[in-house]
Amino acid sequence: MKPNIVVDVGNTRIKWGRCAEDRVVEQASLPPYAPESWEQQVKQWEIKDLTSWVVASVNPEEQSWILNWVKQRGDKMTLIQDRKRLPIDIAISEPDRVGLDRLLNAVAAKDRVARGTSIFIIDAGSAVTVDWVDEAGAFRGGAIFPGAQLMANALHDYTAALPLLKTWANRGFANPQLPGTGTTAAIEAGIFWAVAGGIKALLRQLAARAGASRRHEIFLTGGEAWYLAPVMDLDVQLWPTMTLEGIRLAAEALP
């Protein structure tokens, strides 16, 4: 099936993609629990025909809201949730427990990259994931660690005096200089370089596991991707619509 709109329901935001010409041609980041904003977006995209939606989610509560809203509109809706029906081999011990967003990223990457090339995928959002798709196109797993805002929350919640910060991604700055000359600046620098350094360390280890001398490609997506890309020191390809493309491809692979 070919959807008009694909929806990625995340932990903090909902991302929509408008599909045409066998790709996601536009995207929008929308707030949760906001039917008026959702309806406005549909009107802005001027989709005239009966709208066909495909939804994938890592947030069950928000998923139910948008599914009910789509049904009330009278549109056609498909929910992507069965990992066994995704067009990718999941070569890990517990395939039913891996995050759906991670697999959809892998579906998109596998479709773009020729066999014989390892793929590393960075998704920097509420959590940060760094995953490996091997030369045969199989998802091999990776690593998960807290994203920037979760780190900031933890520093505030589990110390007596450190302030709660809205992190660099939300405040619009990146690559904070060292040394941080005040508490806020030090926290900002610590969080930013913990995320960036953690990603780079994981990529080195995954590349060694895959065979460092072999061909590989690296993709970067997620809400904090734009702030991280300039300091990756690697040939990283920024792909904002990666998860949405994975949803589109998964939907088109359905009978």
Image: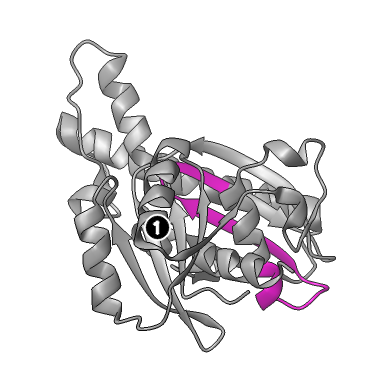
Amino acid type at circle 1 is: Val
- Rendered residue at 44%/45% (across/down): 63
Task: Identify the magenta region.
Answer: 108-129
Q: Is residue 114 visible?
A: yes
Nearer to the camera, 227 or 27: 27
> Can residue 16 be found in the magenta stretch?
no
Quadrant of res 70: bottom left
Nearer to the camera, 190 or 220: 220
Lateral position of residue 12 relative to residue 207, left or right: left
Residue 212 horizontal/vertical position (percent): 76, 60
Q: Is residue 217 visible?
A: no
- Rendered residue at 56%/51% (across/down): 101
Could you tell me which quadrant the C terminus lies in? bottom right
Which residue is under mark 1?
70
Residue 134 horizontal/vertical position (percent): 79, 60
Residue 201 horizontal/vertical position (percent): 58, 46
Could you tell me which quadrant the N terminus lies in? bottom right
> Can residue 110 be found in the magenta stretch?
yes
Nearer to the camera, 77 or 219: 77
Q: Residue lying at the far top in this picture: please name it.
A: 160
Quadrant of res 143: top right
Q: How is the image coloured?
A: one colour
- Rendered residue at 17%/29% (across/down): 183
